[in-house]
Image (tube, rainbow, N blue to C red):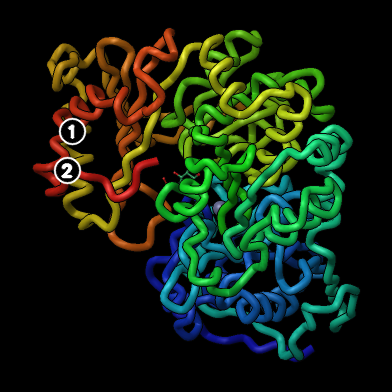
Amino acid sequence: MDIETVPAEPIAGQKPGTSGLRKKTKVFLKPGYLENYIQAIIDGIGGVAGGTFVIGGDGRYGNRRAMQTLIRMLAANGARHLIIGREGLLSTPAASCLIRKRQADGGFIFSASHNAGGEDGDFGLKYNIANGGPAPEAVTAAIYEATKTIAFYRIAEMAPVDLAKIGTSERDGMSVEVVDPVADYAALMEELFDFEAIAALFSEGFTLSYDAMNAATGPYAKAILEERLGAPEGTVVNGEPLADFGGLHPDPNPVHARKLFELMASPEAPDMGAASDGDGDRNLVLGPGLPVSPSDSIAILAANAHLAPGYAKGPVGLARSMPTSRALDRVAERLGVPLFETPTGWKFFGNLLDAGKITLCGEESAGAGSDHVREKDGLWAVLLWLNILARRKETIPEIARTHWALFGRNYYTRHDYEALDTESAEALMAELSTRLPELAGTSAGTLTVEAADDFAYRDPIDGSLTEHQGLRILFSGGGRAVFRLSGTGTEGATLRVYLERFEADAEKHGLDPQEALKPILEAAREVARIKAHIGRTHPDVIT
Ligand code: G1P
Ligand code: ZN
């Protein structure tokens, strides 16, 4: 094998965030940028010699070319075996599933998740470790260190691998195996869920509209929902993975999945609406006339998980990210199992899952998952909902309402202020954080601040400490506001304001969380002086 050692200068700004390195596509296309970062991953993880690695992505613009570069670089650095999804496609949960099933040393996932794709959109690369989950802080820190000291990268001369053909080929001592991206994942789903009951539900006329947003989950959803479970053709919409997502923005929120929201609010609404994001790890579930907030969804899934064969014994423990609503805490309490509160980002669930401390976990940002893989899993959440619906024989609104009647309701919303000038956003956070100690007892809007802190997390398994994970303000009456800056944006800063309020009487404030949360919103605006800092009163996205 001809190996070229190319001198490389450290390139600024290659700091992996909560989900790997995410940048504008044009940044990744700069000569040497991708190569430089790949070599930093290889060096940061201590080399790849003799190793087995999974490679996949969400099919977005630039993926295939980037994969050929990765394959040549893994070869040059001594990897022994590569497992690649056909056409370079693997949803993030399917990649996690493959890494675990094939006992690979790790995996490379090309995706910018729910960010827009294309030449003017975003691109990303994430490294997952042998447990199938996102690289933990220690590993991303080592990768970042390597980006700063890199002196050269290694790349092999080789003809491009034919990603369209399933099968194994040998390349100078490295074997390259192209696999069906769906098969192993679908088999795992069949182990977890009562496929017979779900198939019966569809055969009785249950209707679902699943929007795959022209991204990674299309082939999975078609194979599982339409082919195996007998849902009528057309159940999966936007089911072809396209390099530009067909011009759609693959983020299943009220703005980018507006059509689905409109359909579910109309008289033509099917029994269930669902969507997933670019790489298939997020999920959205809507009932006719009632979108289920992700925080409620994970609570309802946890309370009913025992209805699915894979979770028949019920969860051993539950976890949520700090800004996620505390609806899940009430479920944990009733089940008599521990509840862990972690920082934002799926990687913080990894240790708890590996140690068998939790079975289900979730985030407010449309992420839910379990110990079946080490990533959140969009289609898994939809299948668990279907399994529950098949067993309970109630509608989604009925299930949500019964849940609230039993547990009370945590009204919840997240307000995002996007593309802010970084300085003003940081100034808002800095000022609020300095004022935290003096806030208790002061008034904000019609409420009083009861407590305020800067969230830090001590990992119960490895003892590591993660600080500055969001500013929490607790108000009189049980309301809460959380402030944090996004770690996944690619343009300026995004301020996220999370608002929550508990009511034992679930119908007291009606169904609309925005109405119920008005006092909390007013208090949050005042406490953080949002308008004064960023000059805005209205968020860009409300979820
Ligand atoms: C966002 C979500 C977070 C999720 C992450 C990766 O991160 O808020 O829950 O884990 O994307 O999907 P953020 O932009 O808030 O840092
Ligand atoms: Zn995603």
Residue extending farthest front:
267
- On screen, residue 30 versus residue 340, left or right, reads left
Q: Is residue 69 left or right of residue 417?
A: right
The residue that disc 2 covers is 537
Residue found 55% across the figure and 69% down from its top: 245
Task: Identify the residue at horizontal 52%, vertical 62% (top origin).
Answer: 112
Residue 49, given in percent of the width and then of the height, sits at: 76, 67
Residue 344 position, x and y percent, is: 46, 38
The residue lying at 66 percent from left, 29 percent from top is 360
Q: Amino acid at mark 1?
A: Arg
Mark 1 surroundings within 10 Å by alpha-carbon count, few (fewer than 14), some (14 through 19), many (20 or more): some
Q: Helix, strand, or loop for circle 2?
A: loop
Quadrant position of residue 126: bottom right
* Residue visible at 90% across and 74% down in the picture: 167
Q: Position of residue 234 (x, y in %)?
A: 70, 57
Q: Nearer the viewer, residue 237 or 30?
A: 237
* Apparent side of residue 53 relative to residue 200 in the rendered image (left or right): left
Q: Quadrant of residue 346?
A: top right
x and y percentages locating residue 171 in the rendered image:
85, 82
Point out the image quarter for the N terminus.
bottom right
Circle 1 sits on which residue? 525
- Is label 2 or label 1 in front? 2
For marks 2 and 1, give the CA distance.
Answer: 8 Å
Q: Quick one: SS at disc 1? A: helix
Q: Earlier in the sequence, mark 2 or mark 1?
A: 1
**Circle 2/circle 1 CB separation < 8 Å:** yes
